[in-house]
Amino acid sequence: MAILCSQNGLFLFIIKVIDYFKRLIMTKRVFIIIIHVLAWAAFISLPTAFKPVRPGHPPEGLFQDLMHAYRWLNGLFLICFFYYNYYIIILRYYFGRQFISFALSLLLCCGVFYFINYITAPYAPYGSKVGFGVFGPGYNVYMFIITFIFSFALSFYNQWRITSEEKLNTEISFLKAQINPHFLFNTLNSIYSLAITKSDYTAEAIVKLSGMMRYTISEAHQDRVSLDKEISYITNYVELQRLRMTNKVRISYEVKTANIEQDIAPFILIPFIENAFKYGVSTEEYSDIIIAIDIGEDDMLLQVSNSKVFVKPDKDMGVGLGITNTRHRLKLLYDHRHAITVTDDPKNFSVSLYLNLQ
């Protein structure tokens, strides 16, 4: 009975050990490391696998071949070069548009590659010097080129994947924050008040709100929309805001257009205008909101300024999220084609946004 219990305990222990290593291997980080190790082992062994047998010389095994200085030093260099190129040269210099540093880094790597093969060539075994060039055996050059191309392609793919994920997450957040509930409820209350007093502006207000809702539903999923439609949406928004404002709020809205027949990313301007109305309006203080849009032939400038007034905190306002999402969208859609200037002083807050629409 004691022996049976001991055997069962040993069996359970082995099962737990196997399960532990199984879970360890299945973790993402360990799995990636294993894939990298296996890939490098296969890649570095390729010259041995395809190495022709020389007459009068017995074939060398993988271990014997890797013991040559020019083999293991080149293998170690290729591994270091791959990760240095992937994480530093391409990511920091190429995507950072530091092309001179990018070219100098590659030249430095080529110099190290040449130096390794130059100092190890004299130690190659008899007969192995056949086919040696300034970079050692001919296959070394091909392995160096393959390593560079693969690291470059993998870095591009990873950058594209990250950018796509960021764009998707930003667009999802943007879609969720398109129609601010506070604006919608306040506008409906204002229209209700107009209807109660039988104001002549009731029908006009309903048409403006309807146009905004239609634009939101129909244009939300498009990459580009007509700039004319975007300006119309902003105009309706400002006019509806006027309905609910008291005489304590002075609103200045001006649009100058030289070429309205252009495209723009939808809802890229409105968050900055919403921000002015959210934080620049008070029932107790006088305030100014100034909005100016200047559209040129192939660019535009949005300037929004508001007085700083006391606003009761509201956890559901979500303005910070809207501005943050817009900054992400601008980086994704207008990278190197936009500029934002923010001025924040004790009395006023202003934003200037320049867009190159080409």
Image (tube, rainbow, N blue to C red):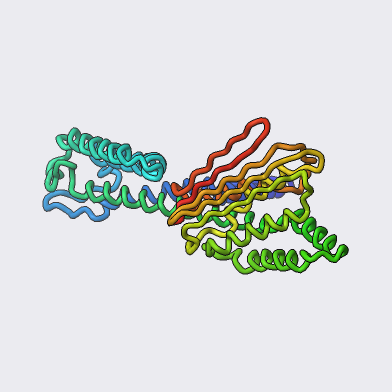
The percent coordinates of residue 19 (x first, y second) are 62, 50
Q: Residue furthest front?
A: 200
Residue 95's image quarter?
Answer: top left
Which is nearer the eye, 37 or 315?
315
Q: Residue at x 64, y 54 (%)?
A: 173
Residue 189 as seen in the image, left or right of residue 256: right
The percent coordinates of residue 10 (x first, y second) are 65, 46
Q: Residue furthest right?
A: 196
The answer to whether one can see residue 14 in this image is: no
Q: Residue at x 71, y 68 (%)?
A: 207
Which is nearer the eye, 197 or 118?
197
Q: Residue at x 23, y 36 (%)?
A: 111
Which is nearer the eye, 215 or 52?
215
Which is nearer the eye, 103 or 114?
103
Look at the image and tell me in which quarter the C terminus lies.
bottom left
Q: Residue at x 81, y 39 (%)?
A: 284
The answer to whether one can see residue 40 in this image is: yes
The percent coordinates of residue 79 (x first, y second) are 35, 42
Residue 52's image quarter?
Answer: bottom left
Residue 192 as seen in the image, left or right of residue 33: right
The percent coordinates of residue 277 (x first, y second) are 70, 47
